[in-house]
Image (cartoon, rainbow, N blue to C red):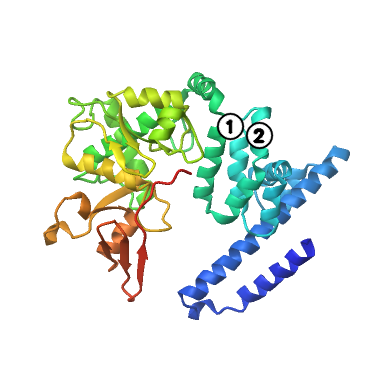
Amino acid sequence: MLKGVVVSVCGLVESIAAVALPCADQHVIERVLTDVRQVRGWLDSVEVAAARRLSELASVSPSLFPEQVVAHAGRVSLVEASKGFDRAKTTAAMPELRAVLEQGAASAAHVDVVTRALRPLSVEHRQRLAERGRVLAEAAAELPCDDFARVVRSEVRRICADDGIDRLARQRRATSLRTWVDRESGMWCLRGEFDPETGAILDRRLRNTVETLFRDRTPETCPTDPVLRQQHLRALALYGLTAGKPAKGRARTRIDVSLLIDIGTLVNGVHDGSVIDVGVPVELPVETLRRMVCCAEVIVPIIVAADDTSLYLGRESRVANRAQRRALRVMYRGCAIPGCSAAFDDCDIHHLRWYRNGGRSDIDNFLPLCHRHHHCVHEGGWKLALDARRNLTIAYPDGQIMTTGPPKIRGR
């Protein structure tokens, strides 16, 4: 079988090399990138196999430093080299995952997702997750890494449902914050680790403060790079919070986090189709989520039925745009453009019929778009339209049309 895989990879490499990319159209480029993904997955499997063999050699030759061998041969750091050995351990525990990696159907990034999931688990729970190897391998072969990570988190939630409270207690005890001054830059630095519940609240408070302080102005100190700009604004927002500059409306309400959860999970506990989202990718036990639903000072609960319809959006007294964002978040987990992985909290709410052209600030005229796709609409000539069921039609400047189905909450 391995010989057949090698022959297939050789064919893919020849196919890639034969394409004249400067003259290629979109469909040819998509095919080339698909082939590249398969070849890269196979190369990842070769690195994993090499790490596995080096570990075997090191077990009989103590003088051998396998990570140093990989770092020197690959011209990478020791930290990067060590990842191959972690992947070797993970694929040894899940042979099904190793198989899809060798076939080029998955990538090293998929294996890293499982490695990170295994690390904090007990021996018993690691074994139980390994027993789900076939399910995870099938998901890795079909899904991009972000979606695959949701599948893995769902599996871990199901396995650890009995001791989620104990894990949260350990995380609370491990919460820490340290500060230091970097000798080279002279910058005062801060690094913290917080339990998931506290982290979700802190994250939302920072986002709210950024929105309030910098909605209508941009500090002169802001970098032009959008990622660095957001990091800069969050740093200023943190100072604003400590300096007593809370978000507007804090005197009226202390709502900080929107908790999205399906009614089945809330009532009966975690199941295969559970929908749990607190705005950041953290894991919380169901008992804690139930308490958060009742904690009206900090949490606004968004509870949805099995058919994705909203049952309760909370009773927080806010201006309409905030309520509309919460309602949109029920329908969309992120940017509405298919294939975009931007989180909902990183999106702008776009008027389909532009406000300056008479568009109304109604829910039917709203769509969440990440900053990049928002620019594509306003500066790039994209035309968007929604029908009554929120089927989205995208008309590109080159005349191509793409239509997607209505948004649907995903349980994984």
Number of disc labels: 2
Give the residue at x 62% y 63%.
38
Q: Please indicate whether residue 333 sits to the left or right of residue 54 in the image.
A: left
Could you say which is closer to the camera, residue 128 or residue 27? 128
Check contact, mark 1 vs mark 2: CB within 8 A: yes
Residue 189, can we see it? no
Could you say which is closer to the camera, residue 345 or residue 161? 161
Residue 115, can we see it? yes
Give the residue at x 36% y 29%.
201
Label 2 sits on residue: 128
Label 1 sits on residue: 159
Could you say which is closer to the camera, residue 410 or residue 316? 410
Residue 28 drawn above or below residue 87 = below
Could you say which is closer to the camera, residue 247 or residue 34? 34
Q: Position of residue 183 (x, y in %)?
A: 48, 33
Secondary structure under the numbered disc 1 in the rendered image: helix
Q: Position of residue 239 (x, y in %)?
A: 30, 30
Secondary structure under the numbered disc 2 in the rendered image: helix
What amino acid does circle 2 point to? Answer: Arg
Q: Please indicate whether residue 182 sits to the left or right of residue 228 in the image.
A: right
Q: Position of residue 265 (x, y in %)?
A: 43, 32
Give the residue at x 37% y 42%.
231
Farthest residue, direction left: 358
What amino acid does circle 1 point to? Answer: Ile
Q: Please indicate whether residue 181 sits to the left or right of residue 68 in the image.
A: left
Structural crowding at the residue carrying mark 1, measured as other residues with C-alpha within 10 Å and reported as few (<14), some (14–19) or many (≥20): some
Query: Which quarter of the image is occupied by the N terminus?
Result: bottom right
Q: Please indicate whether residue 331 sits to the left or right of residue 151 in the image.
A: left
Farthest residue, direction right: 60
Structural crowding at the residue carrying mark 2, measured as other residues with C-alpha within 10 Å and reported as few (<14), some (14–19) or many (≥20): some
Badge 1 or badge 2: first in the primary sequence: 2
